[in-house]
Image: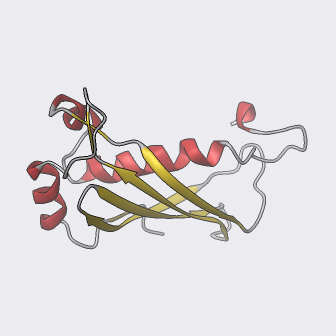
């Protein structure tokens, strides 16, 4: 999108955060978990760590595809990995995020709710956005 580009005409690095957040929740949505349902159950999932590897630039009006995988879930933490491809199927960015389950009202770390753990268990090797 045009507002996502910088003065050089390339997608500004800050926008990758938005792309990956959307991709992460679409992955969850594909197994029956909405972020709204997590919040209603009394949990929040703040990002605690991000790591990006910028391989190529991308430009305005480029069609992008994100492949999102759940790497692990342990205790209060959950890890996702992402691969971002351009319309030529070239890998342009790789990323990982770590999030923590916290109480919605207390912000204290807590174990993931059972409905999330059950959905993940039923959908092992979760990946969304296959090439």
Closer to the camera in the image, 29 or 48: 48
Q: Is residue 63 left or right of residue 2?
A: left
**Front-lying residue, 76 or 8:** 76
- All told, the count of numbered labels is 0
Is 104 placed above or below 112 here? Answer: above
Q: Position of residue 100 (x, y in %)?
A: 34, 50
Identify the residue at horizontal 76%, vertical 65% (top origin). 56
Among the 4 quarters of the image, the one containing residue 64: bottom right
Q: Residue at x 81, y 47 (%)?
A: 10
Frontmost residue, 33 versus 48: 48
The answer to which image quadrant residue 45 occupies is: top left
Q: Position of residue 73 (x, y in %)?
A: 27, 64
Query: In the figure, 131 relative to 115: above or below?
Result: below
Q: Position of residue 17 (x, y in %)?
A: 58, 46
Residue 115: where, in percent of width, then height?
10, 49
**Quarter-wise, where is residue 37 in the image?**
top left
Colour mode of the rendering: secondary structure
Q: Nearer the viewer, residue 87 or 116?
A: 116
Vertical placement of 3 versus 45: above or below? above
Position of the N terminus by quadrant: top right
**Where 64 sits versus 104, above or below?**
below
| Residue at screen point 27% across, 46% down | 109
């Amino acid at each position: 999108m045009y507002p996502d580009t910088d003065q050089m005409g390339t997608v500004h690095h800050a926008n990758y955060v938005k792309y990956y957040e959307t991709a992460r929740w679409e992955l969850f949505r594909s197994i029956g978990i909405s972020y709204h349902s997590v919040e209603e159950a009394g949990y929040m999932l703040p990002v605690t760590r991000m790591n990006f590897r910028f391989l190529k630039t991308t430009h305005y009006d480029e069609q992008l595809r994100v492949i999102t995988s759940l790497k692990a879930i342990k205790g209060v933490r959950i890890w996702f990995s992402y691969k971002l491809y351009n319309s030529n199927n070239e890998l342009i960015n790789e990323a990982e995020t770590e999030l923590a389950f916290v109480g919605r009202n207390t912000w204290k770390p807590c174990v993931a709710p059972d409905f999330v753990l059950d959905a993940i268990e039923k959908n092992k090797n979760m990946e969304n956005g296959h090439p």
